[in-house]
Image: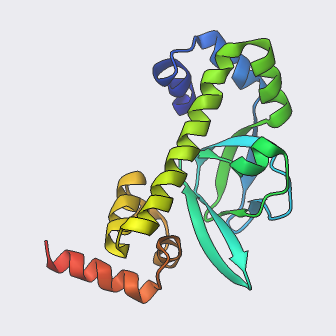
């Protein structure tokens, strides 16, 4: 949970008492591999922080899954549009390994913001994370080759290739696993 304290103090410039107040309202949840944190059709009423493990977000279309995000240790995890609107989500968030998250409910986070506007800094930080990742990914599909998308993925999530299966990475990049193998081989040869 030290990474969360670092966000409060170092990145956001908040005080220790802000972190302690926040910490008093968070709960933890453990997921087994392949267990869902949230499924399509549910309303997301939490913002989570990955203490350990890894998760993937995916949408399903005619029984085909498309990965649209990953959540590794020390990252923020939520179905953010659902969280903001309190409407059912269209995605699924699944544990790719045994995972533990700390989370705060929509009700408690809203209460904190109502009591102390300094917590808006945390809300903005979370919003910025999701907005920037979404924009980068969307732009990369419009402008970049699959090899360039892979390079960006590796910069965004250092060490991801050692943590996430090639099948899931290929799905995230919008390519077949065989194409990912070719791209990696060509990149290795050209180095």
Residue sitting at x 65%, y 78%: 65
Toward the bottom, the furthest residue is: 178
Residue 39 image position (x, y, % from top left): 80, 63
Name the one closer to the observer, 106 or 35: 106
Q: Nearer the viewer, residue 113 or 96?
A: 113
Q: Residue furthest front?
A: 142
Q: How is the image coloured?
A: rainbow
Q: Measured from the top left, where is residue 168 in percent x and y?
A: 53, 74
Please identify the quarter of the rendering in which residue 53 is found: bottom right
Q: Position of residue 33 (x, y in %)?
A: 67, 66
Residue 187's quadrant in the figure? bottom left
| Left or right placement of residue 29 versus residue 17 in this view | right
Position of residue 23 relative to residue 181, above or below, is above
Depth order, front residue of 142/166: 142
What percent of the width, then of the height, locates residue 23?
70, 24
Q: Which residue is drawn at 53% across and 48% down?
A: 73
Instruction: Indicate left or right for 32 with 105 as reference.
Output: left
Q: In this view, does 89 lie to the left or right of 167?
A: right
Q: Which residue is drawn at 80% across and 45% down?
A: 85
Residue 14 in sight from this viewpoint: yes
Vertical position of residue 107 compared to residue 160: above or below: above
Above or below for 180 versus 144: below
Q: In which quarter of the image is the N terminus?
A: top right
Which quadrant is the C terminus positioned in?
A: bottom left
Figure disc tally: 0
Residue at point 49% right, 67% down?
164
Q: Quadrant of residue 189?
A: bottom left
Name the residue nearer the viewer: 154 or 31.
154
Q: Hey, which residue is sitting farthest left in the picture?
A: 191
Specify whether residue 74 is in view: no
């Amino acid at each position: 949970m030290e990474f969360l304290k670092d966000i409060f103090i170092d990145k956001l410039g908040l005080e220790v008492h802000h972190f302690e107040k926040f910490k008093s309202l968070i709960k933890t949840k453990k997921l087994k591999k392949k267990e869902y944190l949230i499924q399509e059709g549910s309303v997301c009423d939490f913002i989570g922080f990955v203490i350990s493990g890894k998760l993937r977000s995916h949408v399903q279309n005619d029984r085909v899954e498309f990965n649209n995000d990953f959540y590794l240790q020390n990252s923020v995890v939520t179905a953010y549009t659902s969280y903001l609107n309190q409407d059912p989500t269209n995605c699924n968030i699944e544990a790719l390994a045994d995972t533990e998250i700390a989370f705060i409910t929509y009700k408690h986070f809203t209460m904190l913001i109502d009591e102390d506007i300094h917590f808006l800094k945390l809300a903005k930080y979370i919003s910025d994370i999701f907005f920037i990742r979404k924009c980068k990914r969307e732009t990369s599909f419009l402008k970049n080759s699959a090899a360039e998308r892979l390079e960006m993925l590796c910069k965004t999530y250092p060490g991801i290739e050692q943590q996430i299966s090639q099948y899931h990475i290929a799905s995230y990049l919008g390519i077949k696993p065989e194409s990912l193998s070719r791209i990696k081989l060509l990149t290795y040869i050209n180095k």
